[in-house]
Image (cartoon, rainbow, N blue to C red):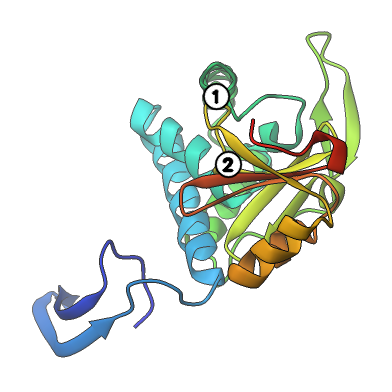
Amino acid sequence: MLGRYREGGPAKITLKGMVNQEERSYTYEDLSFRKEGGDDFIPRLWATRAVGYYLTQIRLYGEKQEWIDSIVSLSTRYGIITPYTSFLVQEKDIFSDKGREEVISDFEEEMAAAAAEPAFGEAAVEKAVYQKSLSAAPVGAAVPVNMSVSTGIDGTSKMVRVSEVLKNVGSKTFLLKNDTWIDTTFDRSMKTKKVAFLGEEYFDLISQVPVLGSYFALGERVIVVHEGQAYETVAEDDSGSG
């Protein structure tokens, strides 16, 4: 059984629902969930469907802070790029509290503007269909090849090649900011352990924690969070804790 749950170990699951207006209940016993691991696509699939659900709720019932916060948080964590979450590839700092507050504020304005648009017509139908497709997605949201994004307060836009600024590695998402690939779970309040690119410690770390190798392979400058520790690969002259 695939899903998202807080803890692993033995479990019993009861599913209840209505079938032909009759309540049905199914119980599955002697199940065992893994404490960690699993297919990488599952978290992103769950997040894609959740974003689609929250967007639909906002369209139908209006804004709720909880829904907006969830959309921004999930889109950032899992790299879900939609016409409503282009802030991921804009020149915004999503790795600080202040930056995230600005993103949420901008997103609220976008949602308010969208709510003012006609609730009928071709555009409205396309929006509803798109949001429904997210909430029922069979796989995680596909990353668009290109996206037109606003670049400043003057309202000008430019075309961004998304694959050049956003990468999914395993269940993690990385954004390219100032020539550094940054794990979206990173926060600027974290202290990074600096590791010289291709230095002795670099290879020792990969030997001890092989999964770091797939993250470090993104480039010379990478910031990744693993088990609560933020690692930053830098030029050898810049190495050392900091």
Secondary structure beneath dot 2 equals helix
Q: Is residue 70 left or right of residue 119?
A: left
> Which amino acid is tagged 2?
Thr
In this picture, is 34 found above or below 158?
Answer: below
Closer to the camera, 172 or 91? 172
> Which percent across, then down, holds residue 161?
88, 46
Secondary structure beneath dot 1 equals helix
The residues tagged by marks 2 and 1 sit, at their Cα atoms, a distance apart of 10 Å
At 57% across and 63% down in the image, what residue appears?
171
Please say if the residues under marks 2 and 1 sit with CB atoms less than 8 Å apart: yes
Q: Is residue 162 left or right of residue 174?
A: right
Closer to the camera, 148 or 79? 79
Residue farthest toward the top in the current orientation of the protein: 154
Q: Residues within 10 Å of mark 1 (few under 14, many from 20)?
A: some
At 16% across and 79% down in the image, what residue appears?
11
Label located before the other in sequence (2 or 1) = 2
Residue underneath mark 2: 76
Indicate the quadrant where residue 56 lies. top left
Indicate the quadrant where residue 84 lies. top right
> Which percent across, then down, holds residue 9?
22, 78
Residue 136 in sight? no
- Check residue 185 in the rendering and tell me which mark sits there, or answer none: none
At 16% across and 74% down in the image, what residue appears?
18
Closer to the camera, 22 or 143? 143
Residue underneath mark 1: 100
> Which amino acid is tagged 1?
Arg
